[in-house]
Image (tube, rainbow, N blue to C red):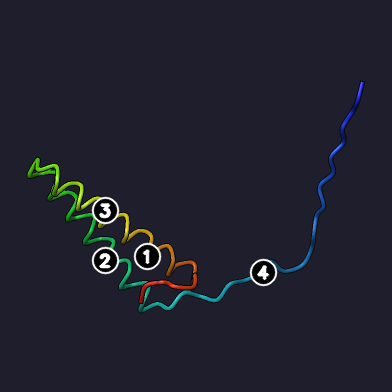
Amino acid sequence: MVTTVTTASITTGSPATSPSPNPIALAAAAARLFRAEIALHDAHQTHVDSWIAAANDRLHEALVDYLAVARCAPGAAT
């Protein structure tokens, strides 16, 4: 019989901090995300599949941009 033992290492100290997101860029990305959510809701009201798909794509892009700004990732939308 083989017994496997795993150990976890615990580090102490202050956690790594990332720079704060630019508040103006974050607000702009949040506004774009909000508008994309409203557009998707409106598209659903029309029952037009192509409009719904386009609005869903726009919402996805807005969410990706918002998360990039919030994380201060390279290539974040401004």
Determine the CA span between mark 3 and mark 4.
Answer: 34 Å
Q: Where in the figure is residue 69, as x and y percent of width and height?
A: 42, 70
Give the residue at mark 2.
Answer: 32
Report the quarter where the N terminus lies. Answer: top right
Q: Is residue 69 left or right of residue 15?
A: left
Q: Earlier in the sequence, mark 4 or mark 1?
A: 4
Secondary structure at badge 1 equals: helix
Q: Where in the figure is residue 20, as x and y percent of width and height?
A: 51, 75
Determine the CA span between mark 4 and mark 1.
Answer: 23 Å
Report the quarter where the C terminus lies. Answer: bottom left
Secondary structure at badge 2 equals: helix
Secondary structure at badge 4 equals: loop
Vertical position of residue 9 compared to residue 15: above or below: above
Nearest to the eye among marks 2 and 1: give it: 1
Three-letter residue code for mark 2 = Arg
Nearest to the eye among marks 4 and 1: give it: 1
Three-letter residue code for mark 4 = Ala
Secondary structure at badge 3 equals: helix
Q: Would you say the residues marked 4 and 2 are in contact, meaning their CB atoms lie under 8 Å apart? A: no
Give the residue at mark 4.
Answer: 16
Identify which residue is drawn at 26% across, 66% down. Answer: 32
Q: Would you say the residues marked 2 and 1 are in contact, meaning their CB atoms lie under 8 Å apart? A: yes
Determine the CA span between mark 2 and mark 1.
Answer: 9 Å
Q: Would you say the residues marked 3 and 4 are in contact, meaning their CB atoms lie under 8 Å apart? A: no
In this view of the protein, which residue sits in the foreground, 27 or 56? 56
Q: Would you say the residues marked 4 and 1 are in contact, meaning their CB atoms lie under 8 Å apart? A: no
Identify which residue is drawn at 45% across, 67% down. Answer: 70
Q: Earlier in the sequence, mark 3 or mark 2?
A: 2
Q: Where in the figure is residue 45, as x and y percent of width and height?
A: 10, 44
Density class for disc 4 (Cα within 10 Å; few <14, some 14-19, many ≥20) is few
Give the residue at mark 1.
Answer: 65
Label number found at residue 57: 3
